[in-house]
Amino acid sequence: MHAIICQTSANPSLFSAEGFVGLIFLLTIGLIITGALVATCARRLVRSIAGLALCFTGVAGIYYFLLAPFVAMMQMLIYVGAVSILIAFAIMMATPEEGDLPSRRISALAGPLGFATGSLIFAALALLGTRTNWQVFPREGSADMKHIGTILLTGHSLVFELISIVLLIAIIGALVLARRGRN
Amino acid sequence: MHLLNLYNCLDTYLVIGALLFGFGVYGLVARRTIIGMLISSELVLAAASVNFMAFNRFTAPDPAIGQIFTIFIMAIAAAEAAIAVSIVIAVYRNYKSIDTEDIVDLHG
């Protein structure tokens, strides 16, 4: 009843080129899982942010496998290069001496309940994704950068301008918020 | 579906997206500090991006739309991270703590 959407259904051997690519893909998945585990479970925030950067690097690899090298490059630049470093700065500026080992008061229940919630949501989403018959549309148009730029500045130009305004307001707001209360 | 052919199948990417989302929700609930919750929310955003890119690669008619949407998600995530970091710094300046249990002036 349910057709798995695969581009090819070959069974490559480990020593062919396709098999080697598949091996690299498995390594990328391992990178993502390791990074997400460290990011959510490490007790020190510095290790947590290192895990987040690792996880984002794996996601950039996933984008490369999804035939979008431009988005992969943007992922490396924006997430690994900017957002992770920004959060690392926040950790350096706003962490008390022993603050990343917080005191335990009510958190005895938060860990198991959070794990239950996360795994339930994961199971539900994974089942939904793999059991649904996704409709495949015929491919029209290409994915090269020229096409992306044309669409970005013609059909989606309003969203593009709105995003730039949002970024401007966010930068000004961040400056105002961080500056307030400082003598 | 062979193990070394996983990168050609849509289901793999959807499961990866669900996994990232699950990790993000777990971190949002279980972390005690604001910065930890911020890190987990970045995982949730990455999960959304992975899903968009997967459907963009396998089912969408125009393969540029999903990439553009992912770039929009990245811009929103950057703005959100900047705002959240400045809020964290403001909270730390007032309370000398980033533990969510210390910031309970209203006892909510």
Image (cartoon, rainbow, N blue to C red):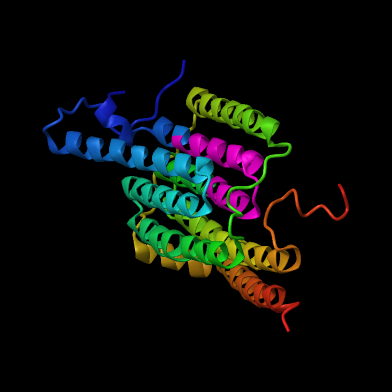
- For the C terminus of chain A, the image quarter is bottom right
Q: Nearer the viewer, residue A132 or A79?
A: A79
**Residue A24: which quarter of the image?**
top left
Q: Residue at x 53, y 61 (%)?
A: A87
Q: Residue farthest to the right?
A: B106
**Residue A137: which quarter of the image?**
top left
Q: Position of residue A17 (x, y in %)?
A: 14, 39
> Quick check: A168 left or right of B56?
right
* B89 relative to B65, above or below: below
Q: Position of residue B93 (x, y in %)?
A: 71, 69
* B69 relative to A22, above or below: below
> Quick check: A63 left or right of A2?
left
Q: Residue at x 60, y 26 (%)?
A: A120
Q: Residue farthest to the bottom?
A: A183
Magenta extent: B16-45
Assign the magenta stretch its main secondary structure: helix
Q: Residue at x 39, y 29 (%)?
A: A5
Q: Position of residue A130 (x, y in %)?
A: 48, 25
Asked whether the viewer can see residue B103, the reply is: yes
Asked whether the viewer can see residue A138, the reply is: no
Q: Is residue B25 magenta?
A: yes
Q: Nearer the viewer, residue A16 or A1?
A: A16
Q: Residue at x 47, y 35 (%)?
A: B14
Q: Residue farthest to the front?
A: A98
